[in-house]
Image (spheres, coloured by chain):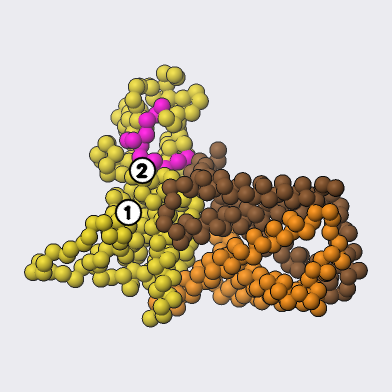
Chain colours: A yellow, B orange, C brown
């Protein structure tokens, strides 16, 4: 095992370049540990995001050796190249604010565009909604609700790179969970927003989203569900 | 549903429906070809099977239509994702390509049948 | 690898499906043109068929059979992804498609070369 890691880290905005740092190798070191070391001891001007450090919040997502991942959950030993090489870049498909921090606005804007917001009809005076947990719809919703909006899937998706309007796997996955929420009243508008080439029909089932998701979610399946739902709606007659 | 969203959705639906039809047609075609090429092929052999065969004419006629729906929609996606061409002119070009495939394919089916 | 995020079977299956689809779309008009020679009569069609007796053409035809079989199998896989309940056996489906395509190609090659 090489005692020193040869780390390349992206510096700058969308224009910029990789700067090289030597970082001492440690046992059980994560990529976030490496970035933290660089910022604390080698390069105080390095910008990056993190929060929980324990694989819950998704803030530390970056591109490590070409793949989007949570850096706090990525052991260096799993990804380090030959002769201790490590390349750390910001998440792809998002504008770079500085160094490893990206502008997530468009990711969340698309979440809103996909009508990823619950539309309720009940008030505090109504009885609780009863939803059978074993119902197919609830199970479909449950399969997708653990998403924390880390943008790893968005970053891994080629359709997001090829089609700037594409809402992306996370937004569409979210829409699908709401399509399956029997309490939600906003599905007519939602189905409309997720149809078309900005929506689910751009997905070609590459499954990179599913492969990369740190929470093992399956946006491909959710998007397939949206394809079926939009077809049913279009077939039954347009508005 | 608004027109654009509905149009894209139905286009996707048509592509999948034609895909299902082609699933059958292509399988039959592959098996037929694998069988027919044994011991060599000749124009006479082909025509002896197709001439006057209404069944084959209908089968391949339907096959042509399915291809004419399926291929242009797929090509449209490829062009939109890899070039800057999009919008009405692309849609029109793809529709024209589909119409051409129907005409050219039925012409061949007619020639083999008649 | 240039794009590590693409290094998984479902992506390669997409690439094969797209390339094969494009190739077949370009081939089909040629195929219709060749078959359309039947309009000019048996001799015309036979003349074309004789031209295909060339080993290079036979090799190309084998390639086409592989592409067609790959596109068929991959297409069925995709119809499954989009319309059937999700299967955890995605990699198996990709492998089976590849196997089917290879088998079709080999069978064709065998049938055109065997005496």
Vertical arrangement, residue A223 with respect to residue A38, above or below: below
Secondary-structure class at tag 1: loop
Quadrant in which the N terminus of chain A appears: top left
Residue at (78, 59) in percent of width and height: B36
Vertical arrangement, residue C21 with respect to residue A60, above or below: below
- The residue tagged 2 is A214
Residue at (38, 71) in percent of width and height: A192
Residue A67 x, y percent position in the rendering:
45, 41
Left or right: B94 in relation to A235: right
Left or right: B30 in relation to A104: right
The answer for which chain carries disc 2 is: A
Span colored in magenta: A66-77
Residue C78 x, y percent position in the rendering:
52, 57
Of residues B101 and A140, which is closer to you in this image? Answer: A140
Residue at (30, 61) in percent of width and height: A137
Q: Are marks 1 and 2 on the same chain?
A: yes
Secondary-structure class at tag 2: loop
Is A72 in the magenta?
A: yes
Residue A46: tell me if it is visible: no
Of residues C96 and B71, which is closer to you in this image? Answer: C96
Residue at (51, 25) in percent of width and height: A82
Quadrant in which the C terminus of chain A appears: bottom left
Is A26 in the magenta?
A: no
- The residue tagged 1 is A144
Q: Nearer the viewer, mark 1 or mark 2?
A: 1
Label ID, residue C79: none
Residue C88 x, y percent position in the rendering:
43, 47
Residue C108: tell me if it is visible: yes
Vertical arrangement, residue B53 with respect to residue C101, above or below: below
Vertical arrangement, residue A21 with respect to residue A186, above or below: above
């Amino acid at each position: 095992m090489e005692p020193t890691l040869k780390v390349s880290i992206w510096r700058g905005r969308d224009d910029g370049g990789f700067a090289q740092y030597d970082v001492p190798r440690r046992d059980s070191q994560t990529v976030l540990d490496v970035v933290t070391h660089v910022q604390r001891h080698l390069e105080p001007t390095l910008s990056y995001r993190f929060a929980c450090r324990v694989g819950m919040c998704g803030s530390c997502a970056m591109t490590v050796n070409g793949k989007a991942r949570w850096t706090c959950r990525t052991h260096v030993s799993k990804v380090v190249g030959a002769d201790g090489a490590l390349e750390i870049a910001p998440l792809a498909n998002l504008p770079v604010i500085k160094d490893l921090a990206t502008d997530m606005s468009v990711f969340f804007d698309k979440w809103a565009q996909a009508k990823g917001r619950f539309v309720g009809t009940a008030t505090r005076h109504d009885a609780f909604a009863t939803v059978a947990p074993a119902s197919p719809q609830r199970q479909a919703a449950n399969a997708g609700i653990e998403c924390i909006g880390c943008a790893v899937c968005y970053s891994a998706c080629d359709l997001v790179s090829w089609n700037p309007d594409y809402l992306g796997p996370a937004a569409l996955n979210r829409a699908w969970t709401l399509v399956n929420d029997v309490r939600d009243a906003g599905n007519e508008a939602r189905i409309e927003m997720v149809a078309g080439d900005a929506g689910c029909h751009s997905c070609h089932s590459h499954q990179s989203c599913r492969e990369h998701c740190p929470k093992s979610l399956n946006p491909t399946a959710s998007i397939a569900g949206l394809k079926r739902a939009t077809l049913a709606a279009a077939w039954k007659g347009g508005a | 549903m608004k027109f654009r969203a509905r149009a894209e959705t139905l286009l996707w639906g048509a592509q999948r429906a034609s895909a299902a039809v082609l699933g059958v047609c292509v399988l039959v075609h592959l098996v037929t070809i694998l069988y027919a090429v044994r011991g060599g092929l000749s124009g006479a052999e082909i025509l002896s099977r197709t001439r006057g065969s209404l069944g084959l004419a209908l089968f391949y006629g339907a096959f042509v239509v399915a291809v004419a729906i399926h291929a242009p929609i797929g090509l449209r996606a490829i062009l939109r994702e890899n070039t800057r061409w999009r919008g009405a002119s692309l849609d029109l070009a793809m529709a024209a390509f589909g119409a051409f495939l129907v005409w050219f394919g039925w012409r061949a089916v007619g020639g083999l049948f008649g | 690898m240039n794009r590590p995020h693409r290094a998984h079977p479902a992506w390669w299956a997409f690439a094969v499906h797209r390339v094969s689809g494009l190739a077949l779309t370009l081939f089909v008009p040629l195929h219709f043109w060749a078959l359309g020679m039947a309009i000019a009569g048996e001799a015309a069609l036979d003349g074309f068929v004789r031209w295909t007796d060339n080993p290079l053409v036979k090799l190309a035809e084998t390639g086409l059979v592989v592409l067609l079989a790959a596109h068929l199998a991959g297409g069925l896989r995709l119809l499954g992804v989009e319309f059937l309940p999700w299967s955890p056996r995605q990699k198996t489906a990709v492998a089976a498609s590849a196997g089917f395509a290879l088998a079709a190609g080999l069978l064709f090659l065998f049938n055109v070369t065997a005496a």
